[in-house]
Amino acid sequence: MSSASSPARASTSSEAGEINTYKGQERALRADRLGTAGLLLSVLAASAPLMVVAGVMPTVFGVMGIVGQPLLYVILGVVLILFSVGYAEMSRHVHNAGAFYAYIARGLGSTAGAGASLTALVAYSAMQVGIYGILGFEVSGLLAAHLDLTVAWWVPALAVALAVAVLGWLKIDLNAKVLGVLLVIECALVVIFDVAAVAEPGSAGISFSAFNPEALSGAGLGTALCFCIAAFTGFEQSPVYAEETSRPNVVVSRVMFLAVGFVALFLAVGSWALTVATGPGAITAQAGEQGPGLLFSLTEARLGGTFTDVLHVLFVTGMFAALLSFHNVVARYAFAMGREGLLPAAFGRTNKTSGAPATGSLLQSAVSVLTIAAFAVTDDKPAGDPTAPVLRLFTWMGNVGAFGVILLMAAASFAVIAFFWRRGAAGAQMWRLIASGLAGIALLAIAVYTVKDFGVLIGAGPDSSLSWILPGIIGVALVVGLVYGAVLKSARPEVHARIGLGNEAFRLERAAESESESGSESGSESGSVNSGV
């Protein structure tokens, strides 16, 4: 009988090294593929430390005029540690590749989970696609400087998008090794620069004025908060890999706290080193003039041309690592949505050879290529002008994605409270729920400031249509997702009830099928006895 043989088949598949799942191996991700080190390297790669130091920090200093950027990383680190307290505890109870929306569904209801699922898909896609802009610009600059080749930024961007598409089909542990090596090297180079900046400070000497709260004044504080919180993006992705880790109850929460602590310290020190190297009074002017070139001009003056050339190469490989990491996350969200019926069933199947979420990977690759093409077609600037690739594609999409992630984290904070309250565990989890509530309020405040200052991001006044169109992308995704969830609740209640359950839904299905078959057999035997009587 099927109910009796299924456990045997699952055991055999597991012994053969295949995927052990409840409803066919194509419905689950490979288990036990990642330990603490592998998962930590994978999620940290999404933050692309060198990209933040060279790309994000000069933008916050120069465009948004926030000298107190080092203090922002400290403040955001505290907020995100508070967020992680409840989020980590939730990860012990819910293992799902669609982490954010699964948690929100389990806490705030399936309709809210549907809204969060589409928001997450759009937000992470935007963040991933935005990186292609600054990567393409940097590669085209390197080709012009070293090979005397004039190439439009979108040519290398498309080439890298195709490479990421191919790697998206490979198993996660290969990607983790690639990401890990690149991450360690680029972090080491940034630390070397930090030491060099302190050893040879600017005209103001070693100053800690960037940590003064007064240094947070500036027209673009809200957008700076959004841009800086995007630098942390990656730590919250660890539950996405829960199904693929060994001991998810321990590994996932451990990685989250390690990632937040490391990123907060690393970025606070790195941004402070920039202010020391230029002088706090000169940082905004120099960052505004040089943009991503600020870091490289400072390293060349202190560490020489060879070090700077290596830094340029690692800048590219670090962005490539971030692209891979975001690609993996988007593919897994699409996989989780397909498995639960929020997307077509094809998205909920994995590559039988590698175990990768193949259809979701293809979806993200298609979105990347189309977005790059759209920005390329509308780019009327000469080669080497950063307007389209850096100031539009990278900055616009990065902030759109970060805004979406901020809203998801705020909703997840309140979902944690609802989840444990409904289960009568509020007393036992009270300190975690208080931490989640404080984090949720802080994140909502950051979201409000982000929308308020979005005009600064695009260099236009509040009357510019882009100041509401860009954050409106996330708003539309949320509303469409909520409406879709409400429609599912009415038209397909069985799919609506499955949202957020992941592979657990198929375990429940299997149990129900077994009970149905047992009931049918019992009825048949009873009929035979009655017939004999």
Image: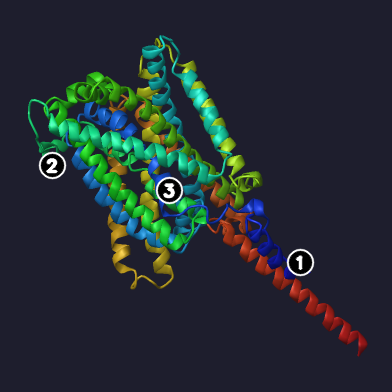
Give residue 145's quadrant in the image. top left
Q: Which residue is mark 2?
A: 213
Q: Is residue 384 visible?
A: no
The x and y percentages for residue 352 are 66, 47
Location of the N terminus (image quadrant): bottom right
Mark 2 neighbour density, 10 Å: few (under 14) some (14–19) many (20 or more): few
Given contact means CB atoms under 8 Å apart, are the residues at marks 1 and 3 in contact? no
Compare marks 1 and 2 and give the one earlier in the sequence.
Answer: 1
**Looking at this view, is 7 or 179 the one in front?**
179
Cα–Cα span, label 1 and label 3: 37 Å
Left or right, 480 with reference to 136: right
Dot 3: element = helix
Give residue 130's quadrant in the image. top left
Which residue is at a point 63% across and 55% down the rendered structure image? 17
Mark 1 neighbour density, 10 Å: few (under 14) some (14–19) many (20 or more): few
The x and y percentages for residue 289 are 23, 18
**Looking at this view, is 240 or 406 the one in front?**
240
Compare marks 2 and 3 and give the one earlier in the sequence.
Answer: 2
Residue type (three-letter) at the residue carrying disc 3: Gln
**Looking at this view, is 359 or 65 the one in front?**
359
Location of the C terminus (image quadrant): bottom right
Which residue is at a point 84% across and 78% down the rendered structure image? 524
Residue type (three-letter) at the residue carrying disc 1: Ser
Given contact means CB atoms under 8 Å apart, are the residues at marks 2 and 3 in contact? no
Cα–Cα span, label 2 and label 3: 31 Å
**Tag on residue 237?**
3
